Image (cartoon, rainbow, N blue to C red):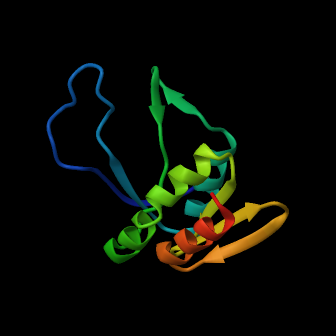
Amino acid sequence: MFQIERAHRIPGGKPTPGRPPRTILMKLLLSMDRDMILRRARECAPTEHQGTRLLFFPDFARQTQEKRRNFNEIKKRLALKDIKYSLLYPAKLRVIHNGTTKFFENSQQALDWMEQMGI
């Protein structure tokens, strides 16, 4: 069993019918508990409660979120081409294409590679 140090909802009113429930932030006592919860959520996806799909995300610092957000358009293009990718912590894109793995520190590197490969 894991221990929650504190938990709270994001401020806002009660969601209207058809809207997803409010976000809940939890601070766990042990980081290994957080890692286990995120791993199990991925393994058991999709997770639902009373007909509502639940999503689990780690909470990153604002700077890390912005760095990761810079890869959004590239991830969409890769997904459309059925090219496997993942976003590694803190903000490194890993792409597996034609049996090789490439890593990109920023979106411009990835865009240059995609142009070179004709993707």
Report whether residue 110 is seen. Answer: yes
Q: Is residue 1 visible?
A: no
Q: Position of residue 49 (x, y in %)?
A: 48, 27
Q: Position of residue 79 (x, y in %)?
A: 60, 47
In the image, is residue 51 above or below residue 2? above
* Relative side of 34 to 40, left or right: left
Q: Residue 28 location, x and y as percent? A: 47, 63
Question: Hey, which residue is sitting farthest right in the picture?
Answer: 99
Q: Is residue 79 above or below residue 98?
A: above
Q: Residue at x 15, y 43 (%)?
A: 12
Name the quadrant containing residue 6: bottom left
Number of residue marks:
0
Tell me which corner region of the image, top left, top right, bottom left or bottom right, holds residue 39: bottom right
Q: Nearer the viewer, residue 119 or 1?
A: 119
Of 9 and 47, the residue lying toward us:
47
Q: Quick one: 71 or 59, which is closer to the camera?
A: 71
Left or right: residue 74 compared with residue 81: left
Q: Residue at x 51, y 74 (%)?
A: 91
Q: Residue at x 81, y 68 (%)?
A: 100
What is the x, y in percent for residue 45?
62, 38
Residue 101, placed above or below residue 7: below
Pick the residue in front: 46 or 113: 113
Q: Quadrant of the C terminus?
A: bottom right
Q: Residue at x 60, y 53 (%)?
A: 78
